[in-house]
Amino acid sequence: MSKILLVDDDAELSSMLEQILTKEGFQLTLAADGEIGLERALSGSYDLILLDVMLPGIDGFQLLQRLRQQSRNTPVLMLTARGDDEDRVAGLELGADDYLPKPFYPKELVARVKALLRRTPNTSVRPEKAEYAGFTVDPAQNEARCDDYVLDLTPTEFDILRTLVRGSGEVVSKDQLSVAALGRSLAPFDRSLDVHISNIRKKLPNEPERIQTVRGRGYRILKLA
């Protein structure tokens, strides 16, 4: 049974989600403010965190930032009330794996939750190690390296890099990457994949251009001379 932490101060919504997710077979823990949410996120072993942006105490962005600073790479699905593109990008830049704007359909939330859990290295079937151009991505060890430097990646970043490395220098489309890492096709004007790629590049020990953008097509790993 997958364990989910929901951090949201909307009591009515939390109660509804508790019923829905419990019925789907998940074990749900609730936190109504940011401080309690952070404490539970750091002290518990959760498979996924559902995180609202607007919270009393510390907001969702601050909570996520502190969580990632502690090298806790639990997948995080952010719930954005305002539907503001800037909020979504800010959450992704801080290390969120995906976002879902409020109001949302319960079935959509359940689908996003299942997709993230299915593609998280901790819970997915272990595919073979992928190696190319100085990159090694080993799902069995939940470890990614670039030139023997261990990369501290979120689950979504891990799956994106694994998909690119398995491409062995071929262009991988944005839609392929989104399906592999997020379990869904990329919607028009959705910038989430671009932000995830940017985050990966920032974590490389050198030469972040080793992940090349192929305009209008997707991304590929460059093999250095």
Image: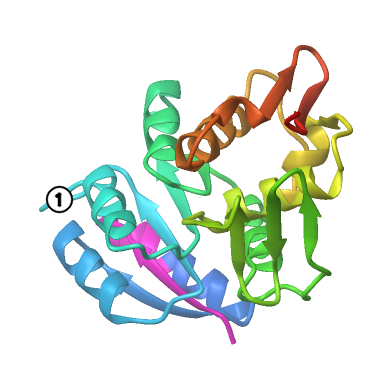
Quadrant housing the N terminus? bottom right
Image spot of residue 28 (x, y percent):
44, 77
Left or right: residue 42 compared with residue 134? left
- Front residue of 54/190: it is 190
Residue type, mark 1 in image:
Ile
Residue 69 in sight from this viewpoint: yes
Give the crowd class for mark 1: few <14, some 14-19, many >=20 residues within 10 Å: some
Q: What residue sits 68% from the left and 47% below the top?
A: 161
7 within the magenta span: yes
Magenta-span inclusion, residue 73: no
Q: Position of residue 166 (x, y in %)?
A: 84, 50
Q: Nearer the viewer, residue 57 or 43?
A: 43
Locate residue 134, reporting x and y percent.
70, 47
Q: Which residue is mark 1?
A: 58
Judging depth in this view, the residue of 18 and 154 nearest the camera is 154
Residue 163 placement, left or right of 31: right
Question: How many numbered badges does the structure rendering display?
Answer: 1
Answer with left or right where residue 84 lies relative to residue 55.
right
Instruction: From this view, report whether residue 176 is shown above or below residue 183.
Output: above
Quadrant containing the C terminus is: top right
Residue farthest toward the left in the current orientation of the protein: 57
Part of the protein shown in magenta: 1-15
Q: Is residue 83 left or right of residue 35?
A: right
Determine if residue 183 is in view.
no
Residue at horizontal 41 percent and vertical 35 percent from the top:
93
Secondary element under disc 1, as helix, strand or loop, is loop
Q: Which residue is pictured at 34% across the width and 49% down the height?
A: 52
Tell me the quarter of the picture where residue 30 sits: bottom left
Residue lying furthest front = 225
| Relative to 188, residue 36 above or below | below
- Identify the residue at the far top of this view: 215
Q: Position of residue 13 (x, y in %)?
A: 39, 58
